[in-house]
């Protein structure tokens, strides 16, 4: 196989399909999405079997636990995948929306129309559900998709891809609207991220190694985030029961996700009261606590934290803990050490909550809620193509609107410029 020729052919087919998809009706797109969801449910057993083969091979190859967690698909996971596709079908179609019209002194009306980006390349590791999520979001937003999943999920990704193609055909849309790259050769990624003539944007979903490579080599614009060092800050006015529940969920529900809390900040005024029960809960679940000197004095089994620990995305049962003087120090710490993904404050003090929302510079900022809610499904987007920590074009969970652009439209009646 000549990788360059293969990728060029995939790009040409995607560009042609994108032109057809950009003109597809909402009914056509929704028909395809419902057919995909139905097929996923129908083939649940086959998808689980393919995933089991992927997991067994990955485990034998020594894949790290966090990646194995992301790779593993359960019956509930398949149901959620189908439900996510259906939710996208139920969302309003953004393509063709026009608004913001204003009359100009010349008599013309000037406004904007929402349009697809064109062809989107998605590069992802481990999670097979991304294949369905990405296909659904690109389809509904009128974009052709080129999907390149990790080699560890190749069997399940191909099985899902076949169901996506089936759904497209049911709706009379080109199968090339969504193409899954079959080769696991890393050279395919190198081609995909440099094919500016065929690909309009790249969305990477993977670890630091993948993102670092793409930042160095990509010639196609990207929507990306590097990592997820998410914080929970327990203010002096935090409700103790809310604090315990939120920290437990944010840190221990799942360890291998980008919206898992990796850092805990506690106001000094309540540290002696809040930290012991929280530490008891965390250690009871096998979480290692790496803390500042004050934390270690309050929590005997905590180990001293290094400077690097406060920057770390552990993706493991480890959490950094720091006692801070007040909300000023908490905000300063977050803005220095955070990866700008998601941060939460637990407090019953409304002015402090509003200040935290204003001053913390992250894509999602929460009050009295677990960081695990930072997710396209939970935000009502149906699914997400990824979570962006960039500030230009899209930020936070990227759903339908994040996969579109706007063009200016002008309405006149024989107007000419004087």
Image (tube, rainbow, N blue to C red):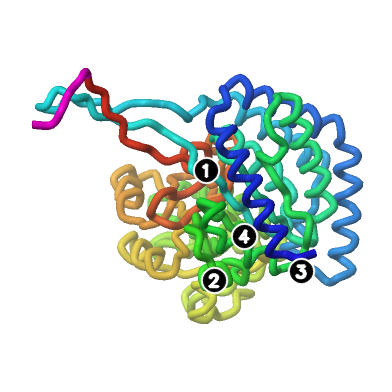
Image height check: is 341 above or below 164?
A: below
Q: Earlier in the sequence, mark 3 or mark 2?
A: 3
- Give neighbour class at mark 2: few <14, some 14-19, many 20+ (Cα, 10 Å): some
Q: Earlier in the sequence, mark 1 or mark 4?
A: 1
Residue topped by disc 2: 217
Comparing 20 with 316, the one in front is 20
Local secondary structure at mark 1: loop
Residue holding disc 4: 192
Relative depth, front residue between 124 and 176: 176
- The residue labelled by disc 1 is 118
Label 3: which secondary element: loop
Give the residue drawn at x 63%, y 23%: 28
Please give the range of residues in magenta: 413-418
Which of the 4 quarters of the picture holds residue 159?
top right
Kindly report the secondary structure that dominates the magenta region of the rendered protein.
loop
Question: Which of disc 2 and disc 4 is earlier in sequence?
Answer: 4
Q: Establish if 406 lies above or below 62.
A: above
Q: What's the CA distance linking mark 4 and mark 3?
A: 27 Å
């Amino acid at each position: 196989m000549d990788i360059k020729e293969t990728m060029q052919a995939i790009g040409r087919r995607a560009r042609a399909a994108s032109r057809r998809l950009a003109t597809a009706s909402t009914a056509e797109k929704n028909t395809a999405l419902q057919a995909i969801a139905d097929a996923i449910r129908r083939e649940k057993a086959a998808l689980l079997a393919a995933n089991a083969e992927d997991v067994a091979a990955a485990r034998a190859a020594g894949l790290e636990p966090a990646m194995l967690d992301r790779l593993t698909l359960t019956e509930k996971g398949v149901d959620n995948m189908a439900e996510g596709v259906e939710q996208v079908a139920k969302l309003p179609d953004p393509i063709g929306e026009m608004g913001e019209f204003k009359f100009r002194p010349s008599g013309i009306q000037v406004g904007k129309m929402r349009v697809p980006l064109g062809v989107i390349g998605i590069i992802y590791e481990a999670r097979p559900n991304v294949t369905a999520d990405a296909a659904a979001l690109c389809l509904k937003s009128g974009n052709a998709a080129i999907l390149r999943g990790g080699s560890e999920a190749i069997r399940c990704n191909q099985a899902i891809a076949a169901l996506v193609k089936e759904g497209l055909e049911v709706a009379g849309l080109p199968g090339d609207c969504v193409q899954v790259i079959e080769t696991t050769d890393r050279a395919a990624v190198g081609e995909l991220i440099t094919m500016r003539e065929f690909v309009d944007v790249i969305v990477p979903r993977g670890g630091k190694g993948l993102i670092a490579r793409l930042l160095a080599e990509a010639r196609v614009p990207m929507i990306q985030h590097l990592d997820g060092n998410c914080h929970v800050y327990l203010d002096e006015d935090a409700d103790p029961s809310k604090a315990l529940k939120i920290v437990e969920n944010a840190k221990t529900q799942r360890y291998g996700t980008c919206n898992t809390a990796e850092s805990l900040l506690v106001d000094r005024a309540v540290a002696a009261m809040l930290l012991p029960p929280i530490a008891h809960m965390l250690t009871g679940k096998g979480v290692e606590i790496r803390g500042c000197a004050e934390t270690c004095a309050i929590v005997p089994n905590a180990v001293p934290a290094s400077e690097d620990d406060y920057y770390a995305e552990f993706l493991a049962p480890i959490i950094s803990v720091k006692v801070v003087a007040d909300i000023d120090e908490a905000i300063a710490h977050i803005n220095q050490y955070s990866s700008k993904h998601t941060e939460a404050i637990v407090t019953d003090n409304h002015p402090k909550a509003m200040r935290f929302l204003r001053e913390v510079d992250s894509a999602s900022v929460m009050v009295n809620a677990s960081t695990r809610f930072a997710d396209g499904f939970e935000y009502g987007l149906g699914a997400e193509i990824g979570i962006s920590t960039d500030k230009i074009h899209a930020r936070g969970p990227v759903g339908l609107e994040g996969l579109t652009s706007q063009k200016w439209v002008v309405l006149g009646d024989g107007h000419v410029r004087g």
